Amino acid sequence: MRPGVDVVVPFRGDRTELEATRARLELLRLGDGDTLEVVDNTATPGYGRNRGAERGSAEWLVFIDADVVPAADLLDRYFDPLPGPETAVIGGGVADEPVPHGAPIAARYAHIRGLMNQDNTFGWGEWAFAQTVNAAVRREAFEAVGGFREDIRAAEDADLCFRLKRAGWRLERREEAGVVHLSRGSVRDLARQLMVHGAGGAWLDREYPGSVPPKRWPGLLWWCARAAASGLVEAARTRDRDPAIVGLLGPVENVAYELGRRRRNEPPRP
């Protein structure tokens, strides 16, 4: 028998978007002792998640983003098998929305690239962390370290994992406990989100030196030029636009992230 779970979903948007989020969450099968909270995310993600966590008392918290489609048995999959006693965080699987060849290029790029896959952050070696787009956290450990930081716009999930690991807790993965992440609608939206992530990465590197070092601009720009040229040549050779999408948006991803490092990670003052 699995432990009880409080599911917390931070949300920001209009009523139509809220109804769409609720419709997706109706797919999630809750058991006895489980709760589901959709919380206001107009301040910061950490603030919203902390408020949602405070409303429950279950042994585990599961954080998922509002723009995902969860598997119906997501909660059961998180605890099959049960995590070890020293595990504080379980990173669930995240698949970018499958889209056809003719889809908008931002959505197609996210799908090909696997932008939200947990491999992207679990591959950071000693600085590995679980993205809270889909992650389970042991309440005892969460409360012991004070939950999420509320004064930053991004990287609150990495910061939480780093503090938990410093306190002696461990991370696990459950790829089979999966959600599908809905893609950004445009290249502009994608670039904006990557800039937010870049600000979070720079903040992490200040707080945890060496965790997210910046790229060198001369080398980055040279790589961007080669990637774009290679993608366009391959697209022309194969008559397939996917290599061109990867060749052009790969540089957009990297440049937007690095430009974002120059921005503040603190939310604007009201």
Image (cartoon, rainbow, N blue to C red):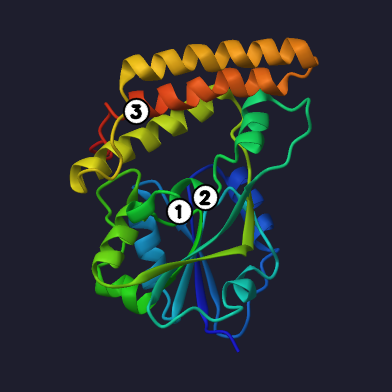
User: Crowding near pointer 2: few (<14 within 10 Å), some, many (20+)?
Assistant: some
Tag 1 near tag 2, CB within 8 Å? yes
Of mark 3 and mark 2, the one earlier in the sequence is: 2
Above/below status of 172 relative to 223 = below
Q: Secondary structure at mark 1?
A: helix
Residue visible at 46% across and 76% down in the picture: 60
Q: Amino acid at mark 1?
A: Phe
Report whether 59 appears left or right of 269: right
Q: Secondary structure at mark 2?
A: helix
Q: Mark on residue 137?
A: none
Q: CA distance from mark 3 to mark 1?
A: 22 Å
User: Crowding near pointer 1: few (<14 within 10 Å), some, many (20+)?
Assistant: some
Above/below status of 246 relative to 225 = below
Where the N terminus falls, by quadrant? bottom right
Residue visible at 45% across and 80% down in the picture: 84
Report whether 235 appears left or right of 10: right
Viewer-proximal residue among 153 and 96: 96
Q: Amino acid at mark 3?
A: Gly
Give the image quarter of residue 209: top left
Report whether 124 appears left or right of 267: right
User: Crowding near pointer 3: few (<14 within 10 Å), some, many (20+)?
Assistant: many
Position of residue 34 measured from the top left corner of the image (x, y, whole percent): 55, 79
Tag 3 near tag 1, CB within 8 Å? no
Position of residue 167 measured from the top left corner of the image (x, y, whole percent): 24, 70
Position of residue 68 measured from the top left corner of the image (x, y, whole percent): 61, 51
Viewer-proximal residue among 189 and 261: 261
Of mark 3 and mark 1, the one earlier in the sequence is: 1
Q: Which residue is mark 3?
A: 260
Q: Secondary structure at mark 3?
A: helix
Q: Mark on residue 122?
A: 1
Q: Amino acid at mark 2?
A: Asp
Q: Mark on residue 119?
A: 2
